[in-house]
Image (cartoon, rainbow, N blue to C red):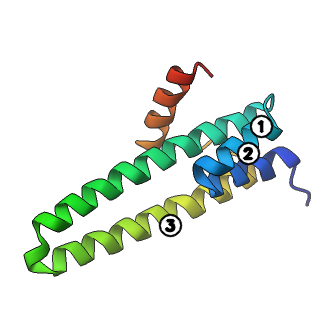
Amino acid sequence: MSISESRVWAAIAWALLIIGAIIALVIRPRDDYVRYWAIESVGLTIVVIVAWIVVEVVSIIFAFTIVIPLALKVLYGLGVFLVWIIGIFKALTGDYWRPPIIHETSEWVRRILRL
């Protein structure tokens, strides 16, 4: 079984977040599949950062409980890790995956950058 070069670059774009997206877009600017995953990666990066800020703010508010901040941070970490792994797998298998919130954010980025 051979994995196409486009799929490998798409997985790199996703796996390395915004840095991978930039590298993939520079190396494969005309590849629609790579472009799709690169923009999805930018969306993932934005969602991860915004979610991290929300988790930190809520953790500060509930810092007196100790359990709530710890649980939030563990759930956040597991969620990000699972989405990241699934995305790498989907990119390598040739799927056009549309994870909720991330895809909507990516569409917003796509409109702003006019891609």
Tag 2 near tag 1, CB within 8 Å: yes
Residue occupied by mark 1: 26
Nearer the viewer's eye, disc 1 or disc 3?
A: 1
Instruction: Say which of 40 and 52 sits in front.
Output: 52
Instruction: Say which of 48 and 85 sits in front.
Output: 48
Residue at the (19%, 67%) spot, across then down: 59
Locate residue 11, reporting x and y percent: 71, 53
Residue at the (8%, 77%) spot, across then down: 64
Residue occupied by mark 3: 81
In the picture, which quadrant includes the C terminus?
top right
State how far apart marks 1 and 3 are (Cα). Answer: 26 Å
Q: Is residue 70 above or below residue 8?
A: below
Residue at the (77%, 37%) spot, across then down: 26
Tag 3 near tag 2, CB within 8 Å: no
Q: Is residue 70 above or below residue 104?
A: below
State how far apart marks 3 and 2 are (Cα). Answer: 22 Å
Report the amino acid beneath label 2: Ile
Quadrant of the rendered image containing residue 30:
top right
Locate residue 79, reporting x and y percent: 42, 64
Tag 1 near tag 3, CB within 8 Å: no
Please, which residue is most extreme toward the right here? Answer: 2
Report the amino acid beneath label 1: Val
Please, which residue is most extreme toward the bottom here? Answer: 66
> At numbered mark 3, what does the secondary structure look like: helix, strand or loop?
helix
Mark count = 3
State how far apart marks 2 and 1 are (Cα). Answer: 5 Å
**Which label belongs to residue 61?**
none
Residue occupied by mark 2: 23
Locate residue 71, reporting x and y percent: 25, 75
Whether residue 99 appears in this view of the structure is no
> At numbered mark 2, what does the secondary structure look like: helix, strand or loop?
helix
Label located before the other in sequence (1 or 3): 1
